[in-house]
Image (tube, rainbow, N blue to C red):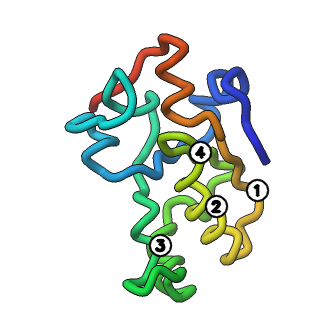
Amino acid sequence: MLVSFEELKDQLTETMVIDSRAPDRYRGEIEPLDHVAGHIPGAVNCFFEQALSPDGRLRDAEDLKELYADILPVKTPILYCGSGVTACVNVIALHSLGKTDVRLYAGSYSDWVSRGEDVSRS
């Protein structure tokens, strides 16, 4: 279920990569933790908080199916966030829908930029 830095680099063009951080962090407008703002090249954004109801629980299955409509058909997507914690909300939500082939880049964005990798701001 876990993906290493090397595996992620090798698979950037092979599968969907999902950034679970807030949209403004994904777009590189703010970056409170890392020395470089942006996202991993080719990643799409799916903010983890969208999977949660106001009381902090997972939304119902129909809402989640709508949220993840573009992800559900993808074979072995890779999810990440800033440090590998909040992406787990998306992982759990996808698992609740029966999508169990999702993988987590636990090092996440902090690991990516610490290795001097290029990031995208588009």
Q: Which amino acid does label 3 sit on?
A: Ala
Q: Which residue matches tag 3? A: 51
What crowding class fits label 3: few (fewer than 14 Cα within 10 Å), some (14-19), or many (20 or more)?
many
**Rendered-image quadrant of the C terminus:** top left
Q: In which quarter of the image is residue 32?
A: top left
The mark that comes first in sequence, 4 or 2, is: 4
Can I make out residue 50 in this image?
yes
Mark 1 or mark 2: whose residue is earlier in sequence: 2
- Tell me the amino acid under the disc marked 2: Val
Look at the numbered disc 1 and give the secondary structure of its residue: loop
Seen from the viewer's position, the closer of residues 28 and 57 is 57
Q: Is residue 16 among the parts visible in the rendering? A: no
Residue type pointed to by label 1: Asp
State yes or no: discs 4 and 2 in contact (Cβ < 8 Å). no
Q: In which quarter of the image is residue 25?
A: top left
Picture coordinates of residue 21 (x, y %)?
41, 50
Residue 101 shows which numbered tag? 1
